[in-house]
Image: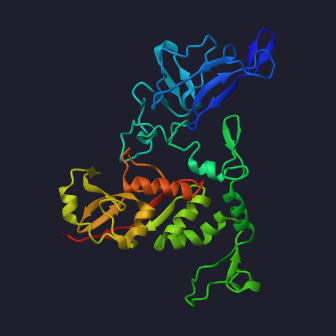
């Protein structure tokens, strides 16, 4: 809203799928119709990393300061940077002006949007995020998969996953883990189960189920179904997995010694379970982890750096990994990426 003399005029903003402000318009004459010739205040077209196109669509209206990723553009003193929540971004070079506080081992600490600005946005300056994806268009459809509702440029509507989640949280009864070794679960007399239902306990939410049962199960038995389920309902809660439960039967010490990459002075490699390191018998492992970085610490022993479970495309190449990732993002629905931390170490062969 802007003040024009004694009156206030509503300015409306059209945003694209990344939250970039593309069009500002106002019903100046109050007739309920936008006249493109006189009532479009500003139009913004961007190069992928946020630098504005110049030389056309120059409109006489007041400049709206919030533009790329919906954040304020600071051009005073010739700065020409974006004021994200936590740090500043320079669209001319596609880089942050300060280092990323979170280390991404595949990217420069100054790189923005995981080097993929047409898929990720980062209005906070803290971590890349999706704004609207194909999964959102599927899951947030108001009625049927071809009807979408937008409010102020934001996609709204009830997700079919939400109704399923409500069902799970209110009615689903989950068997408790077997900690006494009798093979029948631990319901009833110990207070953890429902005495009337034998070895079953009713949890009020996925979060409670995760804290009491699933995080212990995931440690030694984290399946592809678990990974998808946690993506949809875990709300970003990190998962810890014992590294020794993964299969590294053809990852050798010799491969590390040939690598030029280092992590804290130790040789490291990136294993691509869906690409060059794909094996049919560990396909599920590939679908869960994709790429992970391994570090050789001596004595035929490796450790792994944290991974993130998401549906991020890696690079611009049309690879099998990216095809599977794109399909996974569509079919697995609207969820929250989460980190996977690897506990302990694993042994590998010399060659």
Whether residue 51 is visible here, answered yes or no, is yes
Where residue 243 appears, as percent x and y from the top left, is 39, 68
Viewer-nearest residue: 25 or 306: 25
Whether residue 307 is visible here, answered yes or no, is no
| Quadrant location, the C terminus | bottom left
Viewer-nearest residue: 214 or 101: 214
- Residue extending farthest top: 5
In the figure, 196 relative to 269: above or below? below
In the figure, 52 relative to 260: above or below? above
Residue 143 horizontal side relative to residue 350, left or right:
right
Q: Residue at x 43, y 39 (%)?
A: 100
Where residue 192 appears, as percent x and y from the top left, is 68, 78
| Quadrant location, the N terminus | top right
- Residue extending farthest bottom: 182
Residue 50 horizontal side relative to residue 317, left or right:
right
Where residue 319 appears, as percent x and y from the top left, is 36, 52
Q: Residue at x 64, y 84 (%)?
A: 186
In the figure, 254 relative to 75: above or below? below
In the figure, 231 relative to 38: above or below? below
- Chosen colour scheme: rainbow
Q: Residue at x 28, y 56 (%)?
A: 269
Where residue 329 appears, as percent x and y from the top left, is 52, 54
Residue 119 horizontal side relative to residue 316, left or right:
right
């Amino acid at each position: 809203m802007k003040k024009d003399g004694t009156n206030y005029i509503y300015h409306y903003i059209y945003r694209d799928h990344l939250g970039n402000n593309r069009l500002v318009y106002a019903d100046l004459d109050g007739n309920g119709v936008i006249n493109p010739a006189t009532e479009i205040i500003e139009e913004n077209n961007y190069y992928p990393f946020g630098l504005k196109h110049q030389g056309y669509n120059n409109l006489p209206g007041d400049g709206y300061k919030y533009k790329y990723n919906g954040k304020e553009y600071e051009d005073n003193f010739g700065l020409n940077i974006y004021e994200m929540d936590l740090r500043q971004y320079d669209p001319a070079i596609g880089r942050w002006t300060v280092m990323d506080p979170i280390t991404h081992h595949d990217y420069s600490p100054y790189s923005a949007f995981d080097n993929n600005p047409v898929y990720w946005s980062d209005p906070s300056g803290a971590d890349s995020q999706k704004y609207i994806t194909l999964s959102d268009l599927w899951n947030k459809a108001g009625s049927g998969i071809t009807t979408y509702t937008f409010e102020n440029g934001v996609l709204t509507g009830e997700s079919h996953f939400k109704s399923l989640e409500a069902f799970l949280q209110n009615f689903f009864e989950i068997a408790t883990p077997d900690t006494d070794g009798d093979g029948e679960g631990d319901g009833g007399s110990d207070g953890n189960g429902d005495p009337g239902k034998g070895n079953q306990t009713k949890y009020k939410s996925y979060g409670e189920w995760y804290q009491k049962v699933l995080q212990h199960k995931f440690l030694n038995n984290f399946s592809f179904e678990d990974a998808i389920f946690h993506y949809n309902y875990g709300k970003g809660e990190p998962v810890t997995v014992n590294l020794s439960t993964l299969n590294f039967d053809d990852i050798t010490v010799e491969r590390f010694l040939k690598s030029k990459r280092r992590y804290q002075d130790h040789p490291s490699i990136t294993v691509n379970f869906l690409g060059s390191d794909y094996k049919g018998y560990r396909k599920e492992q590939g679908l869960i982890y994709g790429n992970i970085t391994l570090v050789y610490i001596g004595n035929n022993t490796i450790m792994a750096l944290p991974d993130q479970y998401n549906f991020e495309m890696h690079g611009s190449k049309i690879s099998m990994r990216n095809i599977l990732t794109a399909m996974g993002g569509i079919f697995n629905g609207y969820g929250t990426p989460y980190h996977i931390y690897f506990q302990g170490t694993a042994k590998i062969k010399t060659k």
